[in-house]
Image (cartoon, helix red, strand yellow):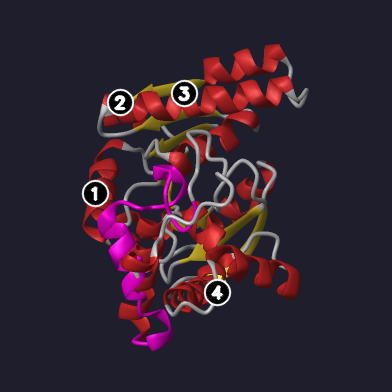
Amino acid sequence: MKVCIFGAGVMGAGIAQVFLTAGHEVVLIDVQQPFVDSGELRIYKSLDHLEEKGKITPEFKKDCHKRLITAIDRDLAAESDFIMEVIKEDMKLKKSLLKELDKICPERTVFSSNTSAMSITEMAASIPHRADKFVGCHFFNPAPVMKLVEVVRAIQTSDETFNFAFELMKSVGKTPIKVDEGPGFVVNRMLIPMMNEAIGIYADGLASAHDIDRAMQLGAGMRSGPLHTADLVGHDVNLAIMETIHDETGDPRYRPHPLLRKMVRAGWLGIKTGRGFFRYDKNGKEIPDEEPVKDDAK
């Protein structure tokens, strides 16, 4: 099957790798060549790591390389069987992309979005004559590792499209769950308020970032604490999700904490920038005993 992924960032490259290692032909597209090159390099490094650990053979790695096409030319999406947008959480950008792809792709193509919280129904409405072929497929970071995919049904999504996407996620080694569209879907509807509260506890000076995470790991059984998880997701993404859910529901639980906004403005986005509630090296490994969000940044 030919799969096209739009957006070659961390999530886009990770999702592309998932489909590659499941045996599909993948086209990875972004708006600038450096973005595409970075995504391709990320995939190659990850495949190298899998080979070193003995999880794939050198031959299979070479086959994955052959089945990966990277480009900035959107016309290469033509003849795709499945398309997923993994671009910035901006509804106008997403709609614009979908409308353009609608002109390129054949009627059989199933369209999907990896949005973390935005309305699948609104996106589907931007391509009205094929809205029934639109579905949400929300992967989690890191996509090659995390097993869950939220398969989200828009009000227009046909049973055929939903079932196709659900079975496709299973076929690439993921565990899908069925979700009817609602702000934040399932995971972020619960996770985001917890992250926001953890940020508030830190900003109030009740405990250090490390101790807040340890409290939830050792006291609530979390594998990763809420602040490290927030750093992993990326604070720009966290902010966008919170704003979306807050705008949709009006619920004050989802109102972003001012410290989160301040960190995003500073470019302290977490692991991807090397600085969030903790510091990270260029490989994304936490630098011990560092807490970069000082008192004067609260």
Instruction: Work out how far the residue at label 2 is from the one at label 4, CA to CA, in angstroms.
Output: 41 Å
Tell which tag, 1 or 3, sits nearer the viewer. 3
Mark 4 falls on what kind of element? loop
Q: Amino acid at mark 4?
A: Ala
The Cα atoms of the two marked residues, 2 and 1, are separated by: 25 Å
Q: Quadrant of residue 204?
A: bottom left
User: Pointer 2: residues within 10 angstroms few (<14), some, or many (20+)?
Assistant: few
Tell me if 76 is positioned left or right of 196 in this view.
Answer: left
Which region shows up in magenta? 250-278
Q: CA distance from mark 4 to mark 3?
A: 39 Å
Disc marking residue 34: 2
Q: Quadrant of the N terminus?
A: top right
User: N-terminal of the two: label 2 or label 4?
Assistant: 2
Residue extending farthest bottom = 251
Observer able to see residue 92 = yes
* Front-most of residues 80 and 35: 35
For label 1, the residue is 99
Which amino acid does the dot numbered 1 rest on? Lys
Answer above or below: position of 136 versus 23.
below
Residue, disc 4: 207
Disc 3 to disc 2, how far (Cα)?
Answer: 10 Å
Marked residue nearer the N-terminal end (1 or 4):
1
Q: Residue at x 44, y 78 (%)?
A: 200
Place residue 34 in its image quadrant.
Answer: top left
The foreground one among 297 and 255 is 297
